[in-house]
């Protein structure tokens, strides 16, 4: 089965349900869908889960998507102002659409849970945050990142 036989959404949910965190799942799904080969995936995304190691900051799915966007469109040398502006524009488009869907990019605000506390972790479990809102965010981020990447192919 080739990479294009499944959508980014399907890959993202498969990875997420198998135990990869939100950032890893999103980055892996985009990489698989877009044909990105890098032996450091998912390792480079591991610390971004649950909003930077459970700190509830930027959603890990957003981080994974931005890493994939950077992999394909990030600048290769400094100074390269044109590449910098291009990547910022692509990320802006992605983040704007993610914010439209989820009203923010902050994990703690999206989930309503403080993952640094036992109470917050229990709340997340009780509310099935992983199977609900986090799965939705991972699927959406992977699909949306692929959309903006395809729009910006050279």
Image (tube, rainbow, N blue to C red):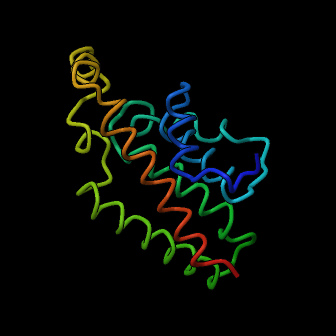
Tell me the residue at 53%/49% (across/down). Answer: 64
Looking at the image, residue 16 lies above or below residue 101: above
* Image-quadrant location for residue 115: top left
Tell me the residue at 35%/69% (across/down). Answer: 96
* Image-quadrant location for residue 129: top left
Residue 55 position, x and y percent, is 35, 34
Q: Disc count in the image?
A: 0
Tell me the residue at 72%/52% (across/down). Answer: 3
**Relative horizontal placement of residue 27, taking residue 34 as reference (left or right):** left
Residue 46 position, x and y percent, is 57, 34
* Image-quadrant location for residue 116: top left
Tell me the residue at 75%/69% (across/down). Answer: 76
Residue 31 position, x and y percent, is 67, 52
Instruction: Decide which of 27, 47 is in the foreground and name it.
Output: 27
Q: Quadrant of the C terminus?
A: bottom right
Residue closest to the far bottom: 82
Q: Quadrant of the N terminus?
A: top right
């Amino acid at each position: 089965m080739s990479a294009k036989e499944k959508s980014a959404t399907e890959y993202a949910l498969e990875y997420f349900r198998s135990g990869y965190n939100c950032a890893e799942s999103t980055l892996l799904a985009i990489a698989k869908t877009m044909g990105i080969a890098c032996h450091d995936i998912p390792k480079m995304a591991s610390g971004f889960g649950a909003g930077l190691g459970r700190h509830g900051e930027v959603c890990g799915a957003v981080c994974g998507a931005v890493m994939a966007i950077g992999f394909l469109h990030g600048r290769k040398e400094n100074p390269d102002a044109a590449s910098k502006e291009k990547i910022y524009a692509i990320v802006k488009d992605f983040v704007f659409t993610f914010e439209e869907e989820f009203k923010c990019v902050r994990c703690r605000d999206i989930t309503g849970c403080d993952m640094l506390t036992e109470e917050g972790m229990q709340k997340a479990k009780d509310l099935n945050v992983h199977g609900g809102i986090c799965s939705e965010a991972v699927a959406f981020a992977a699909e949306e990142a692929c959309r903006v990447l395809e729009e910006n192919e050279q």
